[in-house]
Image: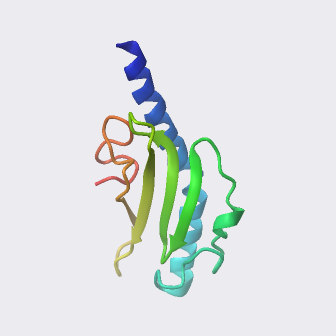
Amino acid sequence: MAVPQYGNYSSRTRAAAAAAELASIKTAVNECIATTGGTTDCNAGSNGIPKVEDFKVTKNVVKLNSISAGIINADTGATTTAGVALTFIDAPTFNTGNANMVWTNSGSTCNDVRGFKAGMGDCP
């Protein structure tokens, strides 16, 4: 019983670490949106956002797939019980008149057993 629980714990830890490692890209996207007034021009390699190939992968972010229109798409070291990488797909939303950017994660890391519970990791 302890081994499956440890696997769940390890996966959740990697999901949280992946979110932390991708935070600098979220900051760059926030700055891009503030500068350009929208997400359209907030792509990898432009307006202060790093190129995908320049991102250093780790055991927590195993692949940065894309940064397009502000949406960050990455494969994480968090996995399903079958070993399939959980995805982190974080999209920014900024409504005029709001003081803060709202990020919503639609990736498979929104998984209350092996990733984030609702309300954590930008999961709805």
The picture places residue 107, in percent across and down from the top left corner, at 38, 55
Given residues 116 and 6, the one toward you in this image is 6
Given residues 54 and 97, the one toward you in this image is 54
The picture places residue 99, in percent across and down from the top left corner, at 40, 71
95 left or right of 78? left
When asked about the image quadrant of residue 81, the answer is: top left
Q: Can residue 100 be seen in this view?
A: no
Which residue, as the protein is rendered here, is positioned at the far top?
1
The answer to whether residue 14 is above or below residue 25 is above
Residue located 71% across and 64% down the image? 54
Quarter of the image where the N terminus is located: top left
The picture places residue 93, in percent across and down from the top left corner, at 37, 72
Q: Is residue 111 visible?
A: yes
Residue located 47% across and 80% down the image? 39
Quarter of the image where the C terminus is located: bottom left
The picture places residue 56, in percent across and down from the top left corner, at 69, 54
Counting the numbered discs, the total is 0
108 left or right of 124? right
Q: In the rendered view, how is the structure colored?
A: rainbow
The answer to whether residue 35 is above or below residue 71 is below
Residue located 51% across and 78% down the image? 33
Which residue, as the protein is rendered here, is positioned at the far front?
82
